[in-house]
Amino acid sequence: MSRRLQGRVALVTGASSGIGEATALALAEEGASVAIVARRRDRLEALATKLQALGAAPTVLVADLSSEAEARRVVTETEARYGRLDILVNNAGVMYLEPVAEADLGRWRHMLELNVLGLIAATQAALPGMRARRDGHIVNIASTAGRVANPNAAGYAATKFGVVGFSEGLRREVYQHNIRVTVIEPGVVETELREHIGDPQVQAATNAWAEGMRQLQGSDVADAIVFCVSRPAHVNINEVLIRPTDQER
């Protein structure tokens, strides 16, 4: 059976759980070599064992991507290991939900640094090689919160609206270099993301809302990513908005 990404090299951030872990496995199943990035080495090494069984020649990179230097480093190390980087999946992120009036700006600053600036720094580092080869695909994970801003999610929405806007501006800068850009906007996904919420009341309400529906799984989003990055070179799927059937907003 033909593997659609045979010979391609991918880097997946936030790969220790959820969408990132599922995406790394899905890319490997299609033949890609995969570098995986997160803070938790034990989770990455467990995933690397699964990837190795799929022939993905995995590389484990432990990093805190809220640091721009670290975001650049993981791209450089991936290119050094494999000689190239074809697919960058910027998935690492946190979700701090709380009312604006009581918001912890330290948390929000960290959220902006990770969700937006870390993503931009990794993208910057990947662009020179992609431009030189006239080939590459950057996939940025946003959210339905990048389309609809809700109470208690103003800061998070600011980061995800930022990712959506950045992705479109980037696409218009790099398309002439044959570099594709896709932004993925998932709705409610059954992952660890809601564990980051610092406000107990907001966390309880958000969990109750999510648990009242059939949530997306990380593999559902990974399937969408694989579809986008496996299209012919003349096809760029710019944006994918994906919600659970049960999710209204």
Image (tube, rainbow, N blue to C red):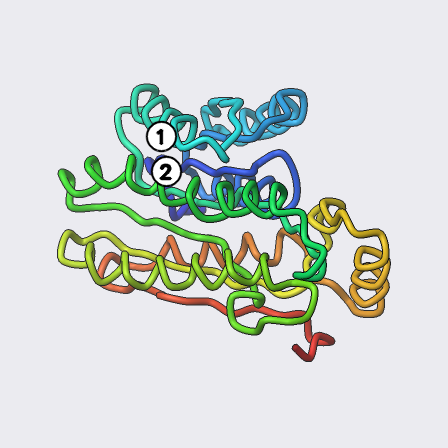
- Crowd class of label 1 (few under 14; some 14 to 19; many from 20; radius 10 Å): many
- Residue 86: image location, x then y, percent: 31, 40
Q: Which residue is mark 1?
A: 72
Are circles 1 and 2 on residues that touch, CB within 8 Å? Answer: yes
Please determine whether, in this image, residue 249 is positioned above or below residue 13.
Answer: below
Q: Which mark is residue 5?
A: none
Question: Compared to 148, does 86 lie above or below?
Answer: above
x, y percentage for residue 38?
Answer: 56, 30
Identified at 65% across, 77% down, the residue is 249
Residue at 69 percent across and 48 percent down: it is: 193
Q: Residue, x 57% and y 36% (percent of image)?
A: 15
Tell me the CA gap for discs 1 and 2: 5 Å
x%, y% of residue 4?
A: 39, 48
Say the numbered circle drawn on residue 122: 2
Amino acid under label 1? Answer: Arg
Amino acid found under the numbered disc labelled 2:
Ala
The reply, left or right, for residue 227 in relation to residue 133 is: right
**Which residue is painted at 49% across and 54% down in the image?**
141
Q: Is residue 156 left or right of residue 206?
A: left
Q: Please tell me which residue lies in front, 175 or 82.
A: 175
